[in-house]
């Protein structure tokens, strides 16, 4: 009904095409889980892994997409003076979220669902479908319950401030659990693993669903399985009921406070490193002013932060996993292969790539009119200053902090790699801006932005980063290779930065 | 006669961390039926907050607020059925058409589809918007959106209407229409709570003026009585005098000199 994610059930062809593309992308992602389920000899183990993946994906969707729907305060002035209760508003949004979540959940489960129906029969297939639905409900109500509790406890103003950090925290936890558990599992051991229910299964929601399937099909019996079945069915119901009965009435108060414009936060002017950086690395006053403008805008734009910061989960967890794996195998010392830190550094750069793809999106096309009338000599200056802001925020700072780690383990001679990563990732950014029509910062609304499923985008970016990492690693094997490679990258960087400043835009 | 709106010792503050700002400070006010109250004050005086409390948007406040003789908290849904609110910079669902949006608002007030269709067409025709009835509102100008907002606040025939800068963005013809509409609504016995910075409009339309500053009422009464009391000619001058801004000419000349 508004500029939120549209359901796609409308007959309008553009929305339907978009929805079909999203649906297809989710089915493709679901194929990954099918690979695991079909390869493992133990069906229950495969199911447990599948439901873990489904739960994780649905929870991250809620954090990223659906929480924006639940906590959307833009229509406060439309709805809150109308004769509808807070519970009705809550229920309306919840139904909207549930329908969307169910569609996504079913799309993700579709390949595995078909496999289970074919391989195990209609009865197992039907209970598997039921378990998928319950997992979706569990993820939605669990996240909903947590959000409402935090909103009630903190009040709207504080919640607004820390909402980003809550989302980053959740995504960090989820990705850490997900990737850590994958790394802990040895593929060879999985082939010989015999699944059994233990007392601690009551703390593992995916095992509740597996137990439900087994119990309904008579594969298992026993008190523990009955408890797990009850948990599978009742937990989402209880969470949903509690949220509706006791927490939904506070949603309206929370939304009013979220939208509160009465208290104007004073921004204190103080010395910042970014000003020093701007003085050193911008070529003229114009670029410096634009750098300062975008630094302020992007650091205060809640939507931009909500789109970019959850990627922090990927960026921190993946490098940590790499380092942890190396440490487990052989400890960390100068003799450890540099491929460890190379992989870590390139993964860390994902935050920069994500920020680049989100920087054009701003509410209500905020800066469009200013771009049209501003007397800029070289419009490309906007792009170069944006790139420098994003580099500063999302590339230089993480790389700088990582350089201490690299120096500590591998010594100063490997610090050049950090510089190499900086130039190669920055060049990715410059080429992205030079190629095609890169939209100017904060100039298009979210509804008009090109929709790419987050998961698919991350997947493509990871492939690009992997290629760069491989090139980097092999160059290091050549004597003086890295110095020459880095020098070439630096020259290309400065030349293409000049070309970027000359870029015209419509 | 029992007042339509009764406010006693209303206070409201907003807290952000350790900072607390008192926006309304022990405000008391009674509003009779069939009157136009001009509610004026400088920016940040607490006008919009007062209106939001009366409309039930903000529900945590101190003091007593009664509408139609009952506390607002007692049956807020029933109260909201009988009031209309035309916000300043109000949000619309801009991907909807006027018909779709107004039908939605009408449905919230339990107006039947047939009656809603009739009313919507009638209002759109009144505001010369019938030809745009099936266009999405994200293509509308500010004035066109404002007309839809006005319709949305009046479609259910409310007894009390809260208006916050309702003439903002309207062309001259539409301004005249709205003024006449307000006059005729008041003759019908409706109560209008009118917030605006346009002093000449407020002066002409209001039966009673309530002026607030920093959350306190600094003047209240009929316009002509207030002007006589303060020995000024216009509401604009009265406003400047009571809010402590009487040296505009000196400020401007100083500024222009330095500029």
Image: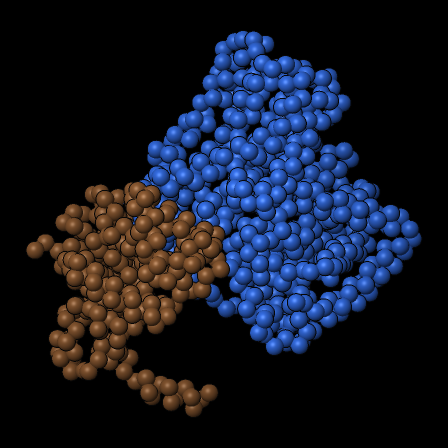
Q: Name which quarter of the figure residue A178 lies in.
A: top right
Pick the front one: B181 or A381: B181
Q: How is the image coloured?
A: by chain
| A41 relative to A20 in the view: left or right | right
Q: Is residue A176 above or below residue A285?
A: above
Asked whether the viewer can see residue B174, the reply is yes
Colour assigned to chain A in the rendering is blue
Q: Is residue B212 above or below residue B258?
A: above
Pick the front one: A87 or B89: B89
Task: Residue B107 in the image: state x and y as whole percent.
Answer: 33, 44
Task: Residue B89 in the image: state x and y as whole percent.
Answer: 38, 61
| A255 relative to B243 in the view: left or right | right
Q: Quadrant of the C terminus of chain A?
A: bottom right
Q: Name which quarter of the figure residue B151 lies in.
A: bottom left
Colour assigned to chain B in the rendering is brown
Q: Which residue of the protein is positioned furthest toward the bottom in this rendering?
A: B257
Residue at 15 percent across and 54 percent down: it is B4
Asked whether the viewer can see residue B90, the reply is no
Task: Residue A176 in the image: state x and y as whole percent.
Answer: 62, 37
């Amino acid at each position: 009904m508004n500029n939120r994610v549209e359901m796609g059930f409308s007959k309008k062809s553009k929305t339907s095409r978009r929805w079909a593309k999203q649906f297809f992308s989710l089915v493709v992602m679901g194929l990954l889980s099918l690979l695991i389920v079909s390869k493992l000899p133990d069906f229950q183990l495969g199911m447990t892994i599948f439901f873990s993946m489904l739960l994780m994906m649905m929870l991250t969707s809620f954090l990223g997409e659906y929480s924006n729907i639940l906590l959307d305060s833009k229509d406060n002035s439309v709805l809150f003076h109308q004769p509808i209760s807070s519970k009705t508003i809550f229920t309306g949004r919840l139904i909207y979220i549930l329908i969307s979540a169910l569609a996504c959940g079913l799309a993700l489960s579709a390949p595995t669902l078909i496999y289970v129906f074919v391989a195990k029969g209609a009865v197992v297939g039907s209970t598997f479908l039921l378990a998928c639905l319950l997992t979706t409900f569990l993820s939605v109500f669990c996240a909903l319950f947590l959000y409402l509790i935090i909103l009630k406890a903190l009040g709207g103003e504080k919640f607004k401030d820390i909402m980003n950090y809550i989302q980053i925290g959740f995504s960090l936890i989820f990705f850490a659990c997900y990737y850590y558990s994958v790394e802990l599992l040895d593929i060879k051991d999985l082939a010989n693993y015999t699944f059994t229910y233990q007392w601690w299964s009551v703390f593992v929601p995916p095992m509740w669903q597996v137990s439900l399937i087994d119990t309904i099909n008579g594969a298992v019996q026993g008190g523990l399985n009955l408890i797990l079945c009850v948990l599978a069915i009742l937990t989402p119901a209880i969470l949903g009921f509690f949220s509706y009965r006791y927490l939904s009435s506070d949603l309206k108060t929370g939304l009013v406070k979220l939208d509160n414009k009465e208290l104007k936060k004073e921004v204190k002017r103080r010395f910042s490193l970014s000003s020093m950086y701007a003085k050193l690395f911008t070529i003229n006053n114009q670029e410096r002013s634009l750098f300062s403008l975008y630094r302020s805008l992007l650091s205060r734009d809640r939507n931009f932060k909500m789109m970019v910061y959850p990627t922090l989960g990927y960026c921190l967890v993946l490098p940590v996993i790499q380092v942890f794996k190396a440490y487990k195998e052989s400890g960390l010392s100068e003799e450890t292969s540099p491929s460890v830190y190379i992989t870590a550094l390139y993964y860390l750069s994902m935050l920069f790539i994500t920020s680049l793809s989100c920087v054009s999106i701003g509410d209500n096309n905020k800066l469009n009119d200013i771009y049209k009338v501003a007397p800029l000599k070289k419009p490309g200056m906007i792009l170069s200053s944006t790139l420098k802001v994003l580099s500063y925020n999302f590339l230089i700072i993480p790389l700088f902090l990582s350089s201490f780690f690299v120096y500590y383990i591998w010594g100063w001679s490997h610090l050049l790699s950090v510089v190499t990563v900086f130039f190669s990732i920055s060049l990715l950014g410059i080429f992205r801006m030079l190629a095609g029509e890169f939209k100017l910062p904060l100039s298009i609304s979210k509804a008009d932005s090109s929709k790419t499923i987050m998961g698919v985008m991350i997947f493509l970016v990871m492939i690009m980063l992997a290629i760069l990492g491989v090139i980097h690693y092999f160059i290091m094997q050549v004597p003086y290779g890295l110095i020459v490679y880095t020098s070439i990258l630096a020259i290309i960087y400065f030349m293409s930065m000049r070309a970027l400043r000359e870029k015209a835009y419509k | 006669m029992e007042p339509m709106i009764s406010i006693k010792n209303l206070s409201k503050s907003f807290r952000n961390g350790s900072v607390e700002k008192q926006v309304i400070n022990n405000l008391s006010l009674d509003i009779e039926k069939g009157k136009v109250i001009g509610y004026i004050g400088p920016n940040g005086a607490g006008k919009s907050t007062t209106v939001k409390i009366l409309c039930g948007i903000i529900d945590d406040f101190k003091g007593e607020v009664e509408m139609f003789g009952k506390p607002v908290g007692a049956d807020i849904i029933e109260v909201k059925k009988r009031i209309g609110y035309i916000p300043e910079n109000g949000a619309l669902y801009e991907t909807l058409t006027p018909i779709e949006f107004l039908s939605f608002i009408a449905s919230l007030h339990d107006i039947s589809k047939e009656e809603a269709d009739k009313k919507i067409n009638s209002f759109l025709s009144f505001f010369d918007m019938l030809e745009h009835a099936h266009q999405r509102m994200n293509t509308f100008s500010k004035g066109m959106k404002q007309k839809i907002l006005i319709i949305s606040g009046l479609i259910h025939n409310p007894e009390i209407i809260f208006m916050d800068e309702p003439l903002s963005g309207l062309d001259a013809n539409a301004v005249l229409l709205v003024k006449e509409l307000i006059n005729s609504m008041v003759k019908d016995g409706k109560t209008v709570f009118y917030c605006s910075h346009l002093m000449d409009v407020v002066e002409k339309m209001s039966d009673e003026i309530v002026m607030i500053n920093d959350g306190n009422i600094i003047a209240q009464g009929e316009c002509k009585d207030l002007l006589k009391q303060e020995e000024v000619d216009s509401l604009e001058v009265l406003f400047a005098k009571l809010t402590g801004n009487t040296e505009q000419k000196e400020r401007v000349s100083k500024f222009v000199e330095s500029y």
